[in-house]
Amino acid sequence: RDAQRIGNQGVLSKAFQNSIDWMPCDLMQWGDADRLVEGADVVFHCAALISYDPKDQAQLMHQNAQSTARLVDACLAAGVRRLVHVSSIAALGPPRDNEPVHEDTPWNEKEASSYYGQSKFAAELEVWRGQEEGLEVIVVNPSVILGTGAFETGSNQMFRKVQRGLMFYSSGSLGVVDVRDVAKACLMLHQGNCIGQRFLLNGANLTFKVLFDEMASCLACRPPAYCPPFWLARFTALLLQGWSNLRGTRNFISAETVKAAYTRKHYDGSRILRTLPSFQYRPWTQTVADGVAHLLYSPEPRPTYRPKP
């Protein structure tokens, strides 16, 4: 991984500092990828770029799909036995006939929700290609991952935004899963030799309103109170996107993120429960409570938030 980001792991770095060998690596460099997997029996591939900014389309395909192809090739060349790949629900197709999205929901290129989803789907194809060439493969497709860790990037930003006084919410829904459950699932699926299979990981289906209200309750701050109509949110996103294009800056909201935020989807993460009866998802309220506890005691500066009246 990037050595400059090791400090972002906080608790992980401190708890296992004597058990982890940190190796800076550029997966797009043949030598780096080969050196990384040399002598390994099993590789867990968890790295990916997450972005819904249209400016990042090429970078998403480069860092997610092409780097995965390079890693698969390195694993095959080095004689690695097994690859456990962390994909995403974004690599799954849209729901059919109001059914929950599951592992076998077919991909539909015309209805692909985002460039990020396209890049993760392309990355998965490389993993399955590795299986055809002799690599043992396990794939997990987690929903929105929440938990302790960095709160300025990724889906954990929601904690920080609510803490800072987020005023708006959307009418859509999302699936959430605890980061500890994702790690546990990867390990248990590997130990259970569940090769050649795909597992959607989802602990709960929630509306954004319910999730934000729970975060605000744990933070003892005011929850978001306003839900703008979809047309207004999309119009605002298009204006901001145009403004960011003129200024050459990054935009924090896009038409893709608005569409996702106003879409209601349900995800079925029960296959792993049937396959591994000893595996259980943590309650999502525990995930939120633990995340807030870590946020409040985080060494990062904590902005003020709007107190309850």
Image: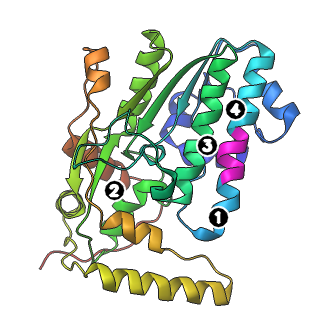
Quarter of the view holding residue 41 = top right
**The C terminus, quarter of image:** bottom left
Residue 299 at least partly seen = no
Q: Which residue is mark 2?
A: 296
Going by the picture, which residue comes out furthest to the right? 31
Instruction: Quickly name the residue at label 1.
Output: 56
Ranked by sequence position, the earlier of labels 2 and 1 is 1
Query: Residue at label 4?
Result: 22
Q: Give the side of residue 93 with respect to residue 219, left or right.
A: right
Judged by depth in the image, the label closer to the viewer, 4 or 1, is 1
Q: CA distance from mark 4 to mark 1?
A: 27 Å
278 vs 264: above or below: above
How far, Cα to Cα, is label 2 from label 1? 32 Å
Q: Secondary structure at mark 3?
A: helix
Label 4 packing within 10 angstroms: few (<14), some (14-19), many (20+): few
Which residue is found at the position 62% from the left and 40% from the top?
A: 123
Residues tagged 3 and 1 counted as in contact (Cβ below 8 A): no
Residue flagged by tag 4: what amino acid is it? Answer: Trp
Residue at the left extreme of this rendering? 309
| Kind of residue at disc 1 | Asp
Q: Residue at x 64, y 80 (%)?
A: 249
Label 4 SS:
loop
In terms of secondary structure, where does tag 1 sit?
helix
Residue 269, above or below 130: below
User: Which residue is disc 3 drawn over?
Assistant: 122
Q: Which residues are magenta?
A: 61-67
For marks 3 and 4, give the CA distance: 28 Å
Q: Earlier in the sequence, mark 3 or mark 1?
A: 1
Ranked by sequence position, the earlier of labels 3 and 4 is: 4
| Whole-percent x, y for residue 285 in the image | 19, 45
